Amino acid sequence: MRLSSTELPINVGLIVMYWSTSGTLFPFLLTRIIHGAIGALLALYLLGRSLRIAFVGSTKFDHVSLRGRLALDIALSISCFAIISGSLAVLYLLNELSLSSLLTLLTIGPILVGIARKQLPRRPAFRMLLPDAPVIGVALFGLSVAFVFREGFVWPSMPGWDIYVHLGVSNWIFAHNGSNTVFATGNSFLGYPYLFHILLASISYVLGCSPYDVLWAGSFFAIPSYGLLVYALAAFLTQSRVQSAFAGTLAMSISGGDSLLGPQYFFPSTAFILLFLLCLAAIAESPLRGLAQTILSATLLVTCYVVYFYTLFLSLGPLIVVLAKRSPNSFLGHWGKLVIVATFGASIVLTYAGSLLLSLGDLSESLKVTLLMTAYPIVLWLSIGAGGLIILIRLFFKRVPGYFDHLILGYVAIVLALYLLPVQFSYRAELMLRPFAAILASYSMVAMTWITTYTRANGVDLARVLKTARFPAKVSVFLLLAISVALVVQPYFAYGQQIPSYSNLSNDEYQAATWLVQHTPHGGYVLTDPSTGFVIRGLTLLNSSTAFIIRGHTPSPANYASLAVVIYRIFYTQNATEIPTDMAQLPQRPDFVVITTRTVSWVAVGGVNSTYYAPTSDNIESFAGLPKFSSSMFSLAASWQTVRIYQLT
């Protein structure tokens, strides 16, 4: 895509609107929506596009598909955004003014360079950005899945305990304008990467909202983006838009739960797989060669690994698949089978060795199988098996000139084997299984087309076949697609209906957290149960219960088991005279005591050994310790239907 004189006012106009909407020209809600949309456009598209036009050369992209240009533009934007955000965070200069100023300068600068180089397009810009029907279908399906999944999560409800860890660190960076560490300090061999939290804080500045808003809305952009990225990668590998739409739809339909979260939450693992698929699409479609392509690929991939490095070794296989498909006449295409075998073997060995180095927990084999069968229904396994069988048949009859589809089959088998290995954290291999299992399952569409149209399955373009096929053939193909998706997506919907009560945040808790932010002194301490304390730490940056913030990091509440015993005794005992003795064992004098329905359930049902406990009842009056906190030692500071805040007198 080249820059035209008509595009300059468009780009500059977007930037001007980005600045103007931060004022009071519009009502607050409309301003926030427009500000966020334009800010996201500026951060995720215009920056990378301007860099590509100015420094890569637009003539190289005349024959590149729309998905290729978009993938490269967005990938460049995110990498540049990560470098800017990380640099500002280390210098404690990460704020709305500095970030917006740099993004604006880095967007306008390359535009001016492009004008000076007289790079004019041959086609109108907006016409080049119009998506085709399969892309629109995949995006709409992803949004529908997100809405159904989040139906029970009315604002500000947010499921998942881990969300409050990421929220706490992101809020700390947001509040302190940066952080001097990208990696956490801990006992593990490698600290947890914190670039994700820096990026989350930066995105919050750009969108003009809090990190919690971004995390809460994660399902609505992560699920459709995931499907579109799988579609883009499958379109490059299969050269069939219909088959790719099937792959993208299946990828979004694979349900998550517990340890296998998938794209329904915006976590570091989710951010990694989205970035990685984006980088694969950008690398695959890039017209660059030689050193320029190597530098581009290295820059994009390093950004992925700094966000989340646990699947570093598993990423070698997909890169080989993309390179084999991208350059069939290269050394890898002609003589690289030994290299491919060595790469897949190295992935297995390095993943096994890396898993042993991580001091993390593991799941039992039976639980791994249970999770896998829950996330991947029988219908999906049948589609995966059918796709693998088709690839083997094509290999046996040598009907395919390339072998990249055989690499997909081999990679899925390897990742599945790694998932079942009895080593620590091997179940994280499932993160890389989803997109390629969906692509492998999409080959069952080729089988259906083969049967219904009596054509061979070698290189069949489903879109082309459907144009010439008779009506029964077209109906059978789309009927297979509809039935498969309907059956596969059911567990996903069921999970969304079952999970709302788990670690959910109520409106009362959200309002109480807002009150605590306004009334608790800097460095204060809130006494409550471990579950509520975990939530309060993430929302308010306050040390609470067994949840602490130490130099911007959030150690696990499980590290303070002895403190949990003391806190349990304070809430459990009916003798108010024992409270001063127990209070003296706390790390500091609490500024407030918070009692929620989580506290009631923890004391009555969960017990001291339950670190995270969701409320089992909305009746806070059933708490036997309320009269104790109504004594002269406490005064009621604030109250909601399911939350009480007391202050020591």
Image (cartoon, helix red, strand yellow):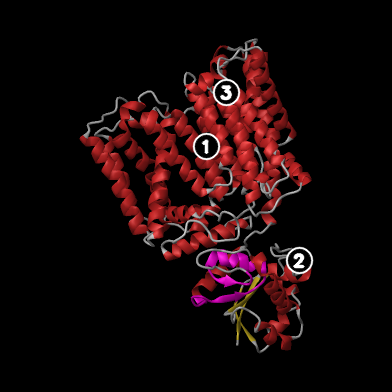
Q: Residues within 10 Å of mark 3 (few under 14, many from 20)?
A: some
- State the residue in front, 387 or 603: 387
Distance (Cα) linking label 3 and label 2: 56 Å
Q: Which residues are magenta?
A: 519-546
Disc 1 designates what residue?
277
Of the image marks 3 and 1, the number of the one nearer the N terminus: 1
Q: Tell me the element at label 2.
A: helix
Disc 2 designates what residue?
606
Q: Is residue 130 visible?
A: no
Image point (30%, 41%), residue name: 11
Distance (Cα) linking label 3 and label 1: 24 Å
Residue occupying the far top of the picture = 454
Left or right, residue 190 beside residue 496:
left
Image point (49%, 34%), residue name: 280
With respect to residue 7, does 478 lie above or below?
above
**Are the residues flagged by discs 2 and 1 in contact, CB closer than 8 Å?**
no
Of the image marks 3 and 2, the number of the one nearer the N terminus: 3
The amino acid marked with disc number 1 is: Leu
Q: Position of residue 61 (x, y in %)?
A: 36, 27
Q: Tell me the element at label 3.
A: helix
Q: Position of residue 186 (x, y in %)?
A: 57, 61
- State the residue in front, 373 or 288: 288
Within the magenta stretch, is there residue 537? yes
The amino acid marked with disc number 3 is: Lys
Q: Quadrant of residue 141?
A: top right
